[in-house]
Image (tube, grey):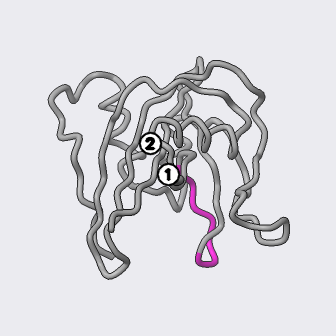
Amino acid sequence: MWIGGVRVIVLDDENRMLMVCQHHEDRDIWMVPGGGIEEGESSLEAAVREVEEETGLDIEVQKLLWHVEEVSERGQRFVNFFLGEMTGGTLELGEDPEFDAEHQVLREVKFLSKEEIQALEHVYPGYLRDEVWHVLAGEDLGYDVFKEREKR
C-alpha cells in the first residue's frame, strides 16, 4: 500500500524560500513544510493544512513541481512537491500534532535565500539547493516532474 505525503515551496517577496528545521536522527535538517496526507484528504488539502500547522501561514497551491516515489524496505511512499503562494496568516513556529509537547521535532521556521540554503549542512531533499531555483526561474521547462528517491 502506498503512503502519501506533501511538501510545499513558498517564496516571499524577496525570493526567499520558506523552510522549517526539524530534528531527526540526532541532527537538524532543513526542509520545506509538509507531511503526511490524512485519511479522506487530497494532497492539495494536505499541503494547505501542513503549511498552516508548521508555519502559521495560509497558502494557495499553484502547481505540482515534483512527484517523488520511493519503493524500498521502508515501503512504498510518494511525496508531491507543490508550489504555493501565501494568502495570509502570521509566520510562527507551529507544532506537529503527531507529537506531544516534549517530543516536537520542529525547531525553527524562516525564509531563507538561495545562498543561505546552499550554505546549510543538512537540506532535504538536495535538489532544494540547486534544481528548484532553475525550475522556479522557468529555466527547466520540460523538466521531469517524476522522480525516484535515491536509495540510502
Whether residues under marks 2 and 1 lie with C-beta atoms below 8 angstroms apart, the answer is: yes
Looking at numbered disc 1 in the image, what kind of residue is underneath it? Ile
Which element is circle 2 on?
helix
Q: Earlier in the sequence, mark 2 or mark 1?
A: 1
Looking at numbered disc 2 in the image, what kind of residue is underneath it? Ser
Residue sitting at 64 percent across and 78 percent down?
A: 26
Q: Is residue 51 above or below residue 78?
A: above
Magenta residues, start to end: 25-31
Question: Label 2 neighbourhood size at 10 Å, few (<14), some (14-19), many (20+)?
Answer: many
Q: Nearer the viewer, residue 12 or 106?
A: 106
In what quadrant of the picture does the N terminus appear?
Answer: bottom left
Residue at numbered disc 1 = 37
Give the percent coordinates (x, y) of residue 141.
Answer: 19, 26
Residue sitting at 33 percent across and 76 percent down?
A: 152
Q: Is 45 left, or right, of 125 in this rendering?
A: right
Q: Is residue 133 above or below residue 117?
A: above
Q: Nearer the viewer, residue 6 or 151?
A: 6
* SS assignment for the magenta stretch, majority: strand
Q: Is 3 left, or right, of 76 in this rendering?
A: right
Extreme residue toward the left, this view: 142
Q: Is residue 39 above or below residue 104?
A: above
Q: CA distance from mark 2 to mark 1?
A: 6 Å
Give the percent coordinates (x, y) of residue 27.
Answer: 62, 72
Give the number of the disc on residue 43.
Answer: 2
Q: Is 143 left, or right, of 104 in this rendering?
A: left
